[in-house]
Amino acid sequence: MSQFAEPYAARVITTLMGMDQEQWQQVARLSTEFGLAFSVQIADELPRINAALDGLLAMSTELIERKMQDVSGDFMSTLVAAQVDGDKLTERELLALVSLLIFGGFDTTRNQLGLAMKTFVEHPDQWQLLRQDPELAAKAVEEVMRVNPTITWVTREAVEDFEYKDLSVPAGTTIHLYSIPAGSDPRKYQDPSFDITASRAPHFGFGGGIHHCVGHFVARIDMREALKTLSARMPNLRLAAPAEYLPDSGNTGPIVLPLAFEPTRSHGVR
Amino acid sequence: MRIEWDESTCRKHGQCEIAAPELFQLDTASNLRVQRQVPAGLEEDAWAAADACPEQAITIIETEEI
């Protein structure tokens, strides 16, 4: 994780946002700390979460200020200058958006890459298929997200009292909607086994509706390219030592994933 | 290969157009044009569009080639 998924995911963000590449470690650290907000330990971790949020907001403020002078037409300068019929994003909207892009782009991608590798360790035949045909990488991303999504639940708050299937939910209740079973629901997937060659109905890993992940194309592309390269360079993939994981609640993934493989003689990327 | 989509579910997010611009076009008046018969070579784009739709409103039907 620390040797690949973390720097890779963080550098995709620093590159996309036009940040200094050296800021990747700060992106990683602040995002990881802020990610505690999605776990069941949130109440205990509030000081760390708030400190990380302050850090993310400060990083975003500095970036926005710098990009206001930037006419390069890159992603961030375009976002900062964006307007429709004279209507622009407010400072507050921009700050929230940029902070969310930095956090949302890193933590989930790092975790999902780790879960992808964990899934392939458990299915070496599928890893071999990917090695033989790297064009399967796009399908592999979808299939990993179906069976092993980093987002296992989405959280909402009841804004009014309501009844659901004999359950009475008072207003103000925090509800965790467990989304991971959507990936193997027999009503949608007759054979839910992990198969990167299968043509599947869409998974729910990026959410749905108006809050569907806005960066999903970026995530799909960078995970696809990572899996292509990793499969080319890591034959006979296996665990070298026991892995450590984040709690299953909320955003999940490996913290440490020690992998072993047979080094290949050629170092070129297929 | 054929594209089917549920117009009542469609919310005009436009992700389909980004994934497969030759198959989906959303104009500024929010009208969506869909190329139902998928030309050879665009099959992967069609699947990408189905995966990208935030409402899962797109279904890909694999038809038999004669």
Image (cartoon, rainbow, N blue to C red):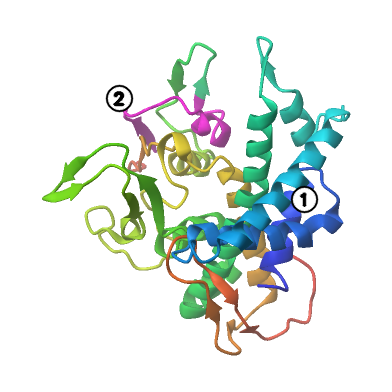
| Residue at which label 1 appears | A14
Q: Was residue A138 drawn as part of the magenta stretch in this picture?
A: no
Is residue A199 in sight in this rendering?
no
Mark 1 crowd level (few <14, some 14–19, many ≥20, 10 Å Cα) = some
Q: Please indicate whether residue A259 sits to the left or right of residue A175 in the image.
A: right
Q: Closer to us: mark 2 or mark 1?
A: 1
Image quadrant holding the N terminus of chain A, namely bottom right
* Image mark for residue B8: 2
Which amino acid lies under the numbered mark 1 shown in the image of this protein? Thr
In the rendered structure, the residue with mark 1 lies on which chain? Answer: A
Q: Dot 1: what SS?
A: helix
Q: Residue furthest bottom?
A: A241
Q: Please indicate whether residue B35 sits to the left or right of residue A31 in the image.
A: left
Q: Was residue B11 drawn as part of the magenta stretch in this picture?
A: yes
Q: Residue at x 69, y 11 (%)?
A: A86
Is residue A166 in sight in this rendering?
yes
Q: Magenta stretch?
A: B1-24
Q: Quadrant of residue A240?
A: bottom right
Q: Residue at x 39, y 38 (%)?
A: B1
- A153 or A189: which is nearer to us? A153
Image quadrant holding the C terminus of chain A, namely bottom right
* Image mark for residue A131: none
A248 vs A236: above or below: above
A125 vs B2: above or below: below
Q: Please indicate whether residue A242 sits to the left or right of residue B59 in the image.
A: right
- CA–CA distance in space, label 2 to label 1: 39 Å
